[in-house]
Image: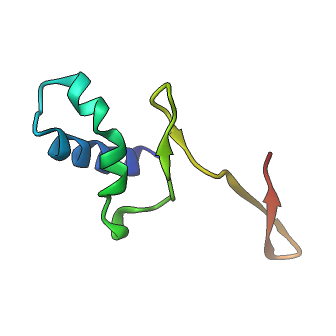
Amino acid sequence: MNYIGMYAFAEAIKAAGSVDDPEKIMAHMQDGLDNLPEEKQVYIIPKIDPNGGFESELIVAAIEDGKVVPIKAD
């Protein structure tokens, strides 16, 4: 999450046109996610929640009999 967060933050700074206005940068975090280059999208994070957190689908898995088995997370 830190990896993708850094790139989203960098894109938000570009969209905000500011490196020192935290409110303006935060207001552009969704733009940061929307403008994230595909090669930097380690996870799919479609949007920012009202508290500023990333909203994404949680995907987990286990190894059973030597195979990766997806587990639905609620």
Q: Foreground residue, 10 or 24? A: 24
- Which residue shows up at 50% across the image and 28% down it? 50
Q: Quadrant of residue 5?
A: top left
- How was the colour assigned to the protein in this rendering? rainbow
Q: Residue at (24%, 49%) from the top-left corner?
A: 11
28 displayed left or right of 21: right
Point out the residue furthest to the right here: 65
Q: How many marks?
A: 0
User: What quarter of the picture does the C terminus occupy?
Assistant: top right
- Tell me: residue 53, above or below residue 36: above
66 or 69, which is in the foreground?
69
Q: Is residue 42 above or below residue 65?
A: above
Image location of residue 70, percent across then percent down: 78, 66
**Apparent side of residue 52 relative to residue 15 in the rendered image (left or right):** right
Q: Position of residue 66 (x, y in %)?
A: 82, 76
Residue at horizontal 51 percent and vertical 58 percent from the top: 44
User: Percent position (x, y) of residue 73?
Assistant: 78, 50
The residue at 76%/61% (across/down) is 61
User: 44 left or right of 21?
Assistant: right
Where residue 54 appears, as percent x and y from the top left, is 50, 40
